[in-house]
């Protein structure tokens, strides 16, 4: 994960392997959470407007990630639209990328330890949160209100 990868995402070129995809997804979700957390203390009309704006931005960034992901196995940008279709998106996420250069560039180098940790966190953090909330009904109730 580096600035070159982020620039290639914004230019709609390059490839993203599965590990990088999950790492970026985790970073997006953390960023989304941190941005929207203060809005929960705002009046409802402001909260709703900011929530819509952040969700649109999040969807656009998710689409950019999906484009890099489908480029990894030599598919076009249009194929990335299927990312928003339930169950089909699992194929886009988990399909193995081509091990050789394709029209979108060479395969990505092996992920760094940090990238691997972020990718694992994408699964681990929500799982731990669910376990904590299920074991502590009082905490879950305080979060609801």
Image (spheres, rainbow, N blue to C red):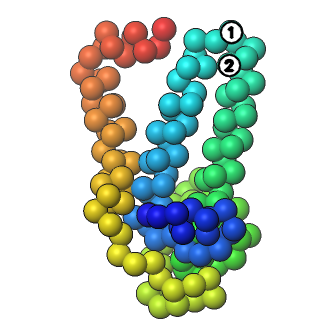
C-alpha distance separating marks 1 and 2: 6 Å
Q: Image quarter for residue 141?
A: top left
Mark 1 surroundings within 10 Å by alpha-carbon count, few (fewer than 14), some (14 through 19), many (20 or more) = few
Using residue 112 as the reference point, say whether residue 23 is left or right of it. Answer: right
**Which quarter shows the N terminus?**
bottom left
Residue 94 seen from this side: no
Q: Is residue 4 above or below residue 44?
A: below
Quarter occupied by residue 102: bottom right
Q: What's the residue at 47%, 64% (across, down)?
A: 2
Q: Which residue is drawn at 47% across and 39% down?
A: 30
Q: Residue at x 55, y 80 (%)?
A: 73
The number of numbered discs placed on residues in the rendered structure image is 2
Left or right: where does residue 124 sit relative to residue 27?
A: left
Q: Residue furthest left?
A: 135
Q: Residue 136 carries which label?
A: none
Residue placed most toward the observer, 75 or 113? 113
* Residue 31 screen position, x and y as percent: 51, 39
Q: Position of residue 107 (x, y in %)?
A: 47, 82
Side (left or right) of 117 relative to 12: left
User: Do residues under tags 1 and 2 come within 8 Å of each other at their CB atoms?
Assistant: yes
Residue 67 or 109: which is nearer the viewer? 109
User: Residue 43: percent from the left, percent from the top?
Assistant: 68, 9
Residue 85 horizontal/vertical position (percent): 64, 55
Q: What element carries label 2?
A: helix
- Residue that numbered label 2 is attached to: 47
Looking at the rendered structure, the secondary structure element under dot 1 is loop
Q: Name the residue under label 1.
A: 43
């Amino acid at each position: 994960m580096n600035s070159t990868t982020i620039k290639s995402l914004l230019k709609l070129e390059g490839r993203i392997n599965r590990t990088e995809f999950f790492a970026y997804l985790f970073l997006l979700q953390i960023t989304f959470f941190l941005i929207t957390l203060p809005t929960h203390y705002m009046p409802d009309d402001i909260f709703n407007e900011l929530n819509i704006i952040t969700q649109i931005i999040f969807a656009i960034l998710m689409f950019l990630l999906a484009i890099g992901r489908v480029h990894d196995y030599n598919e076009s940008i249009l194929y990335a639209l299927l990312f928003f279709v339930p169950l089909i998106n699992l194929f886009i996420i988990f399909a193995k990328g081509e091990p050789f250069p394709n029209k979108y560039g060479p395969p990505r180098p092996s992920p760094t330890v940090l990238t691997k940790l972020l990718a694992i966190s994408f699964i681990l953090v929500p799982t731990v949160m669910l376990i904590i909330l299920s074991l502590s009904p009082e905490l879950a109730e305080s979060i609801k209100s």
